[in-house]
Image: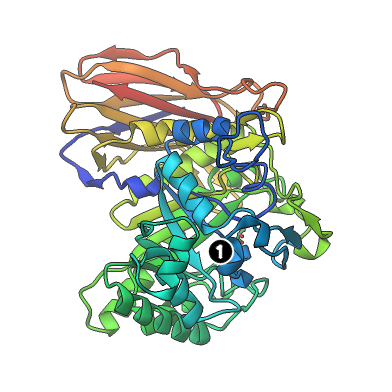
Amino acid sequence: TRARLTLDPAFRIAPVEPRLFGSFVEHMGRCVYTGIFEPGHPSADADGFRADVLELVRELGVTLVRYPGGNFVSNYRWEDGVGPVDQRPTTLDLAWRSIEDNTFGLNEFMAWAAKAGVEPMMAVNLGTRGVAEALRLVEYATYPGGTRLAELRRAHGVDKPHDIRLWCLGNELDGPWQMGHKTAGEYGRLAAETARALKRFDPSLALVACGSSNSTIPTFGAWEAEVLEETYDLVDYISLHAYYDPSDGDVDSFLASAADMEHMIRSIAATADHVAARLRSRKRIKLSFDEWNVWYQSRFGGESSLEWARHPRLIEDCYDVTDAVVVGSLLITLLRNCDRVGVACQAQLANVIAPIMTEPGGPAWRQTVFHPFALTARHARGQVLRVEPDSPTIPTAKYGEAPVVDATATHDPDSGELALFVVNRDRRGPCALEVTLPRGLTPVQHLELADADPSARNTATDPYRVTPRPGSGLTFQDGAATLTLPPTSWTLVRFA
Ligand code: AHR
């Protein structure tokens, strides 16, 4: 098969939004404990943070991290996680039926975020708690001093206020599995009241209202409309969450999962704009895609199947090449929509459906999905370009005819560099891609993630089984390049 596309720096969508390369640390399974935090690990620093993991986080190019949940936050008392560690209580996390010893909390997270060089995105509990507790948390965390809560923080050893600009007003409160699950009307009112109070405290805070947990939940679209009717003038973002897997063995649909992400983005942008029209508002709500990834949910028996345990191994999916291609194409979709999506977080960062895996007391390594994320975060610079591939299609059961080739590109006006990110979703064969580009640019790097065995994975004992390798078969003459995209592959080509 054959596909074509044109790269033209004149056709810009928007500047690359650095907050698209976010991730997520939830108190779930081993994301925090024995993931990013493991006092006593050979690589642990004085704070108990794993230096091997910190190094991989930097290599991954993560810009922002959402914390502390997730379902966990909806029954969390942030007060349990601050103050002298030996006085912190052991509590039950009802979301994941886990025993939480609270040795890691807000101040540890902020210290870790500073070392990782990432922006924090903090969630408040609007499941089992409300306006007052959210206000107390924001005051404790961000007020300089002289009040009871600010002085409490200082007494806890954190003299300077934390700089936290982004706040999530709860998590997935549309979902019946959520502690404190609410109707859209109930949540909309609570989110509005909380937002009003937080903006009174600091009008410059950026607030994220909860949207739907997925695109198949019956209230998808209606939930956002009702929540935004209540909160429109008070919030800056509405959230979207999506997880994909080949649940029924339908790999062709799985490879085209970005079609669902695109549908969600367009639907929720349209819903928000509809509310704006009704309210006669010129303000535009941005989208925060603050949970997205491949997650083999079919292998997870659900929360009620869990036995109470202390940082158990939960949803530690081991990703293969196909999963990495899906992750690469989801990143392409996020970039293409960066005029509307202002935040995105791959869920999660370590061990729990994560690009980074660890063994307690042992090594840390990169999953297959690490690579498209790291390379996109590193090379997507400047402006996102409008790229319209002319591609053959493959029939999929879930999304109808899906383009074989999906692509986006960025152009950095400072360096003049063009970066092309492209996937071949065809499992059955390679695809030749003809690229038309401005004269004077030549290919400087061609990397691909592909394997004769698309189910190849990286493990603790074979951590480099799947890594990006130099691509072959690129022919070039001024203004035109042709390359062969291997079956089920993700490719980066840089021109300078
Ligand atoms: O990331 C795992 C879980 O998925 C989160 O806790 C929840 O928000 C979502 O359902």
| Residue 346 shown left or right of residue 338 in the figure | right
Residue 432 drawn at (x, y percent): 42, 23
Q: Is residue 363 left or right of residue 173?
A: right
Q: Is mark 1 within 8 Å of ligand 1?
A: no
Location of residue 156 with respect to 45 vertically, above or below: below
Q: Residue at x 20, y 34 (%)?
A: 8
Which residue in the protein does label 1 denote?
Answer: 214
Q: Work out whether residue 267 can be spotted.
A: no
- Vertical placement of 174 versus 426: above or below? below
Quadrant for the C terminus in the image: top left
Question: Measuring 68% from the left and 71% from the top, which residue is drawn there?
Answer: 177
Image location of residue 38, percent across then percent down: 65, 41
Can I make out residue 196 in this image? Answer: yes
State the image quarter where residue 62 is shown. Answer: top left
* Amino acid type, label 1: Asn
Q: Find residue 335 and report its horizontal and vertical position in percent.
A: 36, 45
Local crowd size for mark 1, using a 10 Å CA cut-off: few (<14), some (14–19), many (≥20): many
Ligand 1 rendered quadrant? bottom right
Q: Provide residue 372's location: percent of width, then percent of height.
A: 48, 33
Seen at 46% across and 75% down, the residue is: 136
